[in-house]
Image: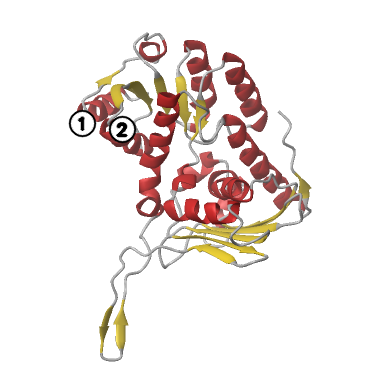
Amino acid sequence: MQKFALIGAGFIGSVHAHNLASHPDVDFKLVYDIDLQRATTLAAQHGATAAASLDQIFENNDLDAVFIASSTDSHAQNLRHAADAGLAALVEKPIDLDLETAKSTVAYVERAGIKAMVNFNRRFDRAHAELKELVHTGQIGDVALLQLTSRGPALPPVDYLKSSGGQFRDQAVHFYDLARWITGQDPVKIHAYGSALAAPEIAEFGDVDTSISSLLFPDGALAQIDCVRHTNYGYDERIEALGSEGMAESERQRSGHVTLLQGQQAQSHGLHGNWFDRVQPTYAASLGAFVQSLEDDREVPITLREGLKSQAIAQAAVRSAASGRSETIDYSL
């Protein structure tokens, strides 16, 4: 049994609390949140104990790992605390919104030698994983073009957007990671465009709600990623991989799979109403993969360095959208 503490009792923390409590190889011990009442409520729901301070977690000799789901600006510091305490860590992205701070944190954690994984949970989507396997086993030949789509049904709250780091760092970064993972390559250049169309007011703090990113890989393959914050037809996520011998597609998913035919009419289900309904199973799967790496004492599936690479792509996208030019991606640690 791996003994876990959870830091962060907000929405995503509550998702992780449920998964921690449900995992057969996890002993869910502690929950910490800056709001003690929120931590107490969440802990009580899942048979854990609320920690009154972070010291109760990082000075606890009876823990194996910590799940960091606190506010973005605390991720790096909590990773450093975990490194000092010798605790394995699973952390929500990003490591830190500031790339240089993220780099120094990764170096610090690597020197400590703990197991640490960044939670790019979409790698654990079953359809995406099957597509990746088709690519890696050569069933579509040499990859020429990837098309990745992420379109949300409704704009997140403006307060969230102000602290999110912007669409490239917050939304598109998941798909930069998927593009790297599927191709097995690190793109060398990016050209990005972004506009604030659904909510022009977010341009006041430098954000966009509609964007396209074009990636160039070392072997000449290309990827295009389109991201939209607001649609009127549901949450739309899909990937298409075109190769020299064929194509593989991880299709958009509907909320149901039955179609009713009557006379000349057909009624079928639309897309999921929100992003969480679409990707919810991936959170339990990513936790399971992390726990398995602890049980088997092997490398975690997604290292912090991999997370840093996807963040470097996002940073180059921000530069490109501002400059109007293609930008070289700098992966140096």
- Name the residue type under label 1: Gln
Q: Nearer the viewer, residue 228 or 244?
A: 244
Q: Secondary structure at mark 1?
A: helix
Residue that label 2 marks: 17
Front-most of 246 and 261? 246
Contact between labelled residues 2 and 1, with CB atoms less than 8 Å apart:
yes
Residue sitting at the far bottom:
264
Labels 1 and 2: the sequence-earlier one: 2
Q: Residue at x 38, y 54 (%)?
A: 278
Report the residue at 34% width, 31% height from top. Answer: 9
Residue at (63, 32) in percent of width and height: 98
160 on left or right of 141: left
Residue at image position (61%, 24%) is 106
Quarter residue 293 falls in: top left
The residue labelled by disc 1 is: 45
Which quadrant holds the C terminus?
Answer: top right
What amino acid type should be assigned to the residue bearing mark 2?
Ala
Indicate whether 308 appears above or below 81.
Answer: below
Query: Can you tell which quarter of the image residue 58 is in?
Result: top left
